[in-house]
C-alpha cells in the first residue's frame, strides 16, 4: 500500500490531535482525582470525630477487644491520608499504583468500622437507631469516595451493608462535602436525642 505525502501529513496531524486530546484527558482526570483526594483529606479528621461519637454512645456496651478495633479504624484513616499524600507527591508513572493503595486504605476503614459495629451487643437496645443512622452516614460517605476514585468499576470494592445488633442496614454510596456530612450527622444525632456527639 502506498500513501501520498498529503495522506501521510493528514495522518500526522490526526495522530498529533489524538495525543494532544489524550494528554488533555489525562490532565482532566488528574485534576478530578486531585479534587476527590482533597475532599477525602478534608473529611478524614471529621470522619475520625464522627466515629469517636459512635464509640462514645456505645461506651458502656463495648465488648472485649473493641478497643483494638477502634485503634484499627483510626490507623486505617491515617493510612488513607498517608496514601493520598504519597500519591500527590509521586511522579505520574507511579500514580496508578498509588490509587490502588488509596482504595485499599479506604476499604479498610469501611471494613474496620463494619467489624466494630458487628461486634456490638446492642440487640433490642434503643441505641441501635442512632448508631445505625450515624454509621450509615459515615459508611455511605466512604462508599461515595470509593465510587469517585479513578479506577475501573470492576475494581471498586464498595460494601453494600453492615450489621448492628443482628440487624442489617444498607450502605448507599453518597457524595458529601465536609459541610453536608456534618449537617447529616448532626441531624441524625439530634433527631435521636444525642446532640452531645454533634460535630
Image: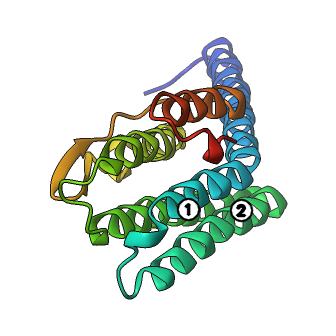
Name the residue that disc number 1 marks.
56
Q: Which residue is more in the foreground, 79 or 72?
A: 72
Assign the N terminus to one quadrant of the image. Answer: top left
When the figure is inspected, residue 73 is found, relative to residue 23, above or below; the finding is below
The image's colour scheme reads rainbow
Q: Would you say 196 lies left or right of 89 here?
A: left
- Mark 2 crowd level (few <14, some 14–19, many ≥20, 10 Å Cα): many
Rendered residue at 64%/71% (across/down): 79
Q: Would you say 142 lies left or right of 7 here?
A: left
Rounded to the nearest angstrom, the CA distance separating label 2 from label 1 is 24 Å
Rendered residue at 56%/35% (across/down): 185
- Residue 81's tag is 2
Q: Position of residue 40 (x, y in %)?
A: 67, 46
Quarter of the image holding residue 58? bottom left
Q: Which residue is more in the foreground, 30 or 195?
A: 195
Quarter of the image holding residue 21? top right
Mark earlier in primary sequence (2, 1): 1
* Callout 2: SS: helix
Q: Position of residue 153 (x, y in %)?
A: 36, 41
Rendered residue at 49%/25% (across/down): 2
Q: Which residue is more in the foreground, 96 or 11?
A: 96
When the figure is inspected, residue 16 is found, relative to residue 85, above or below; the finding is above
Amino acid at each position: 500500500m502506498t500513501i501520498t505525502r498529503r495522506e501521510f501529513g493528514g495522518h500526522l496531524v490526526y495522530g498529533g490531535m489524538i495525543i494532544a486530546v489524550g494528554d488533555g484527558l489525562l490532565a482532566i482526570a488528574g485534576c478530578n482525582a486531585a479534587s476527590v483526594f482533597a475532599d477525602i483529606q478534608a473529611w478524614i479528621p471529621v470522619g475520625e470525630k464522627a466515629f469517636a461519637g459512635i464509640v462514645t454512645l456505645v461506651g458502656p456496651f463495648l465488648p472485649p477487644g473493641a478497643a483494638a478495633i477502634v485503634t484499627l479504624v483510626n490507623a486505617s484513616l491515617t493510612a488513607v491520608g498517608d496514601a493520598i499524600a504519597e500519591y500527590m507527591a509521586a511522579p505520574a508513572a507511579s500514580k496508578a499504583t498509588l490509587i490502588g493503595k488509596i482504595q485499599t486504605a479506604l476499604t479498610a476503614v469501611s471494613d474496620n468500622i463494619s467489624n466494630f459495629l458487628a461486634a456490638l451487643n446492642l440487640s433490642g437496645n434503643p441505641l441501635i437507631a442512632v448508631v445505625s443512622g450515624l454509621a450509615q452516614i459515615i459508611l455511605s460517605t466512604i462508599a461515595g469516595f470509593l465510587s469517585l476514585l479513578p479506577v475501573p468499576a470492576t475494581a471498586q470494592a464498595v460494601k453494600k451493608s453492615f450489621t448492628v445488633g443482628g440487624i442489617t442496614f444498607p450502605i448507599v454510596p453518597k457524595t458529601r462535602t465536609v459541610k453536608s456530612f456534618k449537617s447529616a450527622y448532626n441531624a441524625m444525632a439530634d433527631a435521636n436525642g444525642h446532640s452531645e456527639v454533634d460535630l
